[in-house]
Image: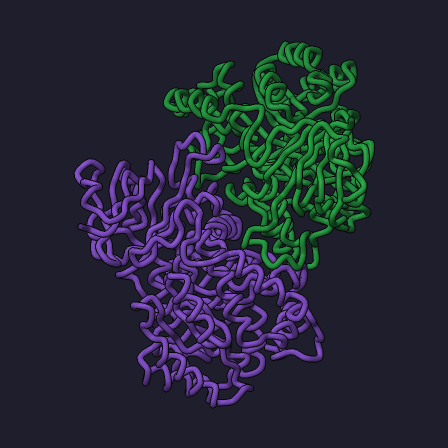
Chain colours: A green, B purple
Amino acid sequence: MTDLLIQNARVLQVVDEQTTILNAHDILIKGNRIDAIQATGAANPSHFKQVIAANDMLAMPGLINTHAHVPMVLWRGLAEDVNINTWFNDYMWPLEHNLRVEDVYWGMLLGLAEMIEAGVTSVADHYFHMDEAAKAVEKAGTRALLGWAIFGSDGIAQIEQTAGFIQRWQNAAGGRIRTMLAPHAPYTCDDDFLRACVDKAQQLGVGIHIHVAETKEQTQASLEKRGITPVQVLQETGVLDVPTILAHVKGATPDDIALLAQYETGIAHAPKTYLKLASGFAPLLEFREAGIPIGLATDGAVSNSTLDIFESMRLMAMTQKIRTGIAEHFAIPQTLHIATRESARVYGQPDELGHLAPGRLADVILVDMSGVHHQPLHSVTASLVYNTQTPDVKTVIVDGQIIMRDRELLTLDKAEIIHEVTQRMARLAYRDPQHRIQTYNP
Amino acid sequence: MTDLLIQNARVLQVVDEQTTILNAHDILIKGNRIDAIQATGAANPSHFKQVIAANDMLAMPGLINTHAHVPMVLWRGLAEDVNINTWFNDYMWPLEHNLRVEDVYWGMLLGLAEMIEAGVTSVADHYFHMDEAAKAVEKAGTRALLGWAIFGSDGIAQIEQTAGFIQRWQNAAGGRIRTMLAPHAPYTCDDDFLRACVDKAQQLGVGIHIHVAETKEQTQASLEKRGITPVQVLQETGVLDVPTILAHVKGATPDDIALLAQYETGIAHAPKTYLKLASGFAPLLEFREAGIPIGLATDGAVSNSTLDIFESMRLMAMTQKIRTGIAEHFAIPQTLHIATRESARVYGQPDELGHLAPGRLADVILVDMSGVHHQPLHSVTASLVYNTQTPDVKTVIVDGQIIMRDRELLTLDKAEIIHEVTQRMARLAYRDPQHRIQTYNP
């Protein structure tokens, strides 16, 4: 008996930035890995413990969110139509003054429920009280790469706290949970703090997930204050000597891009947040020309509203087309390459995730393209990128386990989560700009 | 007995660009109009022929699509990642060489099904063989403002054909169908042709729906060829002397905007198309400052992929924020004003549509905001603009009639429509750039 048969799917393959659809194919799953992908007909359903009839749905790798602050869903909708300074100083950091340890657990569960429904199976999350986040991931059955966000102003002891978290959770939940150090940003962590993070990361054998050069203004401020860019700060402090996820990097200079191309790093890209905050375009074309991988991301829901990687995917392609003025750029095959294999590389599992093939981890989502908004289906890949809405994702498999089937969440109780979050709303929404966890002044 | 009671909704009100939510309110509908909006509790359900339990769903006016080519859904996905010249000359106009009269009926039905599911109850459509489109609208139960697209090169007799269509369909289907003249654009219709259109429009008492200054390049080309802008061509030929819907107008100069402010006109805005074609931003802030109304639009699905006005709404706000660099612009109340009352003004029914109030036409949609992607619901309006997906639209009422209930279409047979469209796919997808209906050379 093999464990799971996904029968009669259209299977998306992205190879060398070209896409193919294998029509009428089965995916055979043994344990937590893909065993085979083959034409429908050969596999006998009675030889499998579980069978999913895909009925021509599209099978693709589970989506990867390479930079988020998932528990921020707790404050969704509370900081709209404001610029980045106001967003931090008058909204987000005062709101986070209300955060309690157990809030993180319920906020994480809510965001994980939203992501599972959207076909997002892995998330690189950067937040506080991460033992709670890890417990939520363990329960949800998804994957996560968790970093405990720390600020230099909170003192060097924070790094030991993070180290304890990493030792407790690295490779936990059967390998579904991995960890990183997560110093907030060069403008909130001084050089000694960053160097201490690097030392600890090297000692523990993990990477670093950090915000850097989020806007051109941050780069300009760094140049004025200390004569080097935020990216150069990362180089000088040794941060780039460990594997890194760099969030946003919209303020990268041409020299920064050439510099980053020499390191094992990836850019996490959250276009909805950039649009909503009017905080500028990212130089994605230049990153890609330099060979630096791009991962799709949502950032937190207080800026991004949603944790929807399908939306990030199409917004990335569309904003880069309009930025460059060239509609041929970020074409559908490249866009799907970024969403799958390149995001897996940024996430640090390029050989395990982001592609459906024998031996890979069995993270698979099934997308129903029978709705009128996809019809007639002249192009599966065009419709996947530009027409898919998250309710089209019907079934989600992570590590060989079905965690959503026909839109029903099998690991999480939505009513309980919404109840727990709802009763926290009033307390969490209190806002006094005099009491904030940090001040934005890059 | 009154006809229809919508019980216990949250009712969106947009007044003077400010939003209010009337929680726990009922909407009472008599015939095709709203009779009353009042706190839940007073109305006795047994006095109504039909009752819809809204259960806290958001009630808002049916969305209005102010510029589309609905039957183009027939070719969805066939012209991706190309610029506007290639899009017209190598794809759209060769593809339309395959169009047969009865294709318009089925394409229109498919697009109407997609729009009903997305809460779009009215569409200003600009296409060919419009008797077929009108029959489809009559069947679907929606509203439409239909214009038969004509090119100068096809000869002046086209105008008489359109006149016949207008005489057959103006105010048909109980007033749900209205009509306009629809000359394609100044670059495809010479001045005499445009003047003849104006004469006919005045004679029939209808307006004109036309593409103008779609890009800055079109404005530049017009200036080089004849020394005036496309908008000035409309003024000189008298087009602006009748009520107009002007599609796109991204190439409007400051003088054009001042000129347009003197006329009864509105701008139809389709941001997803502009992003996908990398064809530039529209000067919406300047239009609004001049008092010119903006209507949301989708254009055709071959450029826009979807006919989703919720998507147009958030893309409009986000692209205008990034264009101006000011996150405070196109704030949620203004965005909802554009989506409702301003779009109704562009559509030509500012006192009948786009607002829920006694005496108005009963076009109401119910949006379910209980999903995890809306939770916790700190801000109904923020979530409406930035988190709503079309499957959240559960029930659609047009002209007092329920045409979708709990996601079930009551007027259309989706399986039949998809079957009819699918069997046309191969014939319609044939493409020979030597055989095109027009040449794009503005």
The residue depicted at 56 percent of the width and 63 percent of the height is B73
The front one of B426 and A110 is B426
Q: Is residue B370 left or right of residue A405?
A: left
The percent position of residue B17, horizontal first and vertical second, equals 32, 49
Vertical position of residue B276 compared to residue B222: above or below? above
The residue depicted at 44 percent of the width and 63 percent of the height is B268
Vertical position of residue A52 compared to residue B84: above or below? above
Tag count in the figure? Answer: 0
The front one of B256 and B421 is B421
Residue sitting farthest toward the front: A46
- Specify the quadrant of the image occupied by residue A291: top right
- Specify the quadrant of the image occupied by residue A442: top right
Vertical position of residue A70 compared to residue B411: above or below? above
The percent position of residue B234, horizontal first and vertical second, equals 43, 78
Residue A297 makes an appearance in the image: yes
The percent position of residue A217, horizontal first and vertical second, equals 58, 39
The residue depicted at 63 percent of the width and 57 percent of the height is A377
Residue A434 makes an appearance in the image: no
The front one of B310 and A203 is B310
